[in-house]
Amino acid sequence: MALDRSNPVPNDLSAFWMPFTANRQFKKAPRMLVSADRMHYRTADGREVLDGVAGLWCCNAGHNRPKIVEAIRQQAGELDYAPAFQMGHPKAFELANRLRDMAPSAMEHVFFTNSGSEAVETALKIAIAYQRAIGQGTRTRLIGRERGYHGVNFGGISVGGIV
């Protein structure tokens, strides 16, 4: 269903269950963002809202930046996604090497994820695997920050202390 710019609230809000949101209350009075540019979102009635959390930490350079939009367009035209299971793309290896070269010398490897939640989940698994690899497989306790947000996945919620 295409978005009707004159009425950006869809007729049916029931299918999308929003994380960390009081869904019934939201759906009674939806707050829809319809576009974004640089550091601001825009609402249906034209108000600008400062994006003070970088799109929940995934748009650190802001929104709709022409150079980034063009880079995304070019890459999608070449290859939009390559799975990292038993396959790879040269640019993933190039970026991993660039990141490794910028990191402190003890950091020799890069593991790409699709989100912060996935990154936390992967870090927890790597921590447990590391303990097994060094012969301390009984060390399985994971520590997180109390009342800290560590993503929406089971592991991140478990170490985050947010009920």
Image (tube, rainbow, N blue to C red):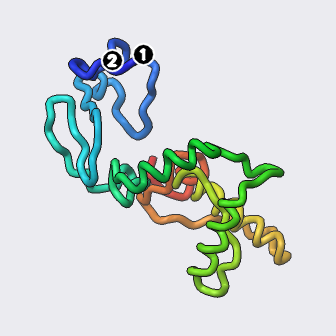
Residue 64: x and y in percent read 34, 48
The one nearer the camera, 86 or 18, is 86
Is residue 31 toward the left or the right of residue 12 in the image? left
Measuring from the top left, give residue 159's x and y in whole percent.
Answer: 55, 58
**Residue indicated by mark 1:** 1
Vertical order, 98 against 60 (above or below): below
> What residue is at 83 percent from the left and 72 percent from the top?
133
Distance (Cα) linking label 1 and label 2: 9 Å
What is the residue that sits farthest to the bottom in this orientation? Answer: 105
Crowd tier of the residue under label 2, counting other residues whose Cα lies within 10 Å: few below 14, some 14–19, many 20 or above: few
The foreground one among 94 and 108 is 94
Return the disc, 1 or 2, that comes first in the chain's sequence.
1
Residue at screen point 63% across, 59% down: 112
> Which quadrant would residue 9 be assigned to in this image?
top left
Question: At numbered mark 1, what does the secondary structure look like: helix, strand or loop?
Answer: loop
Viewed as shown, does residue 159 lie left or right of 66? Answer: right
Q: Amino acid at mark 2?
A: Pro
Residue 44 or residue 127, whichever sits in front:
44
**Which residue is labeled 2 in the image?**
10
Please identify, in this view, whether the residue under mark 1 or under mark 2 is nearer the observer: 1
Q: Residues within 10 Å of mark 1 (few under 14, many from 20)?
A: few
Q: Is residue 53 above or below residue 135?
A: above
The numbered dot on residue 124 is: none
Do tag 1 and tag 2 residues touch (Cβ < 8 Å)? yes
Q: Quadrant of the N terminus?
A: top left
Which residue occupies 74% across, 51% down? 84
> Horizontal and vertical percent for residue 33?
27, 35
Which picture quadrant has residue 140?
bottom right
Residue at left 27%, top 47%? 37
Amino acid type, callout 1: Met
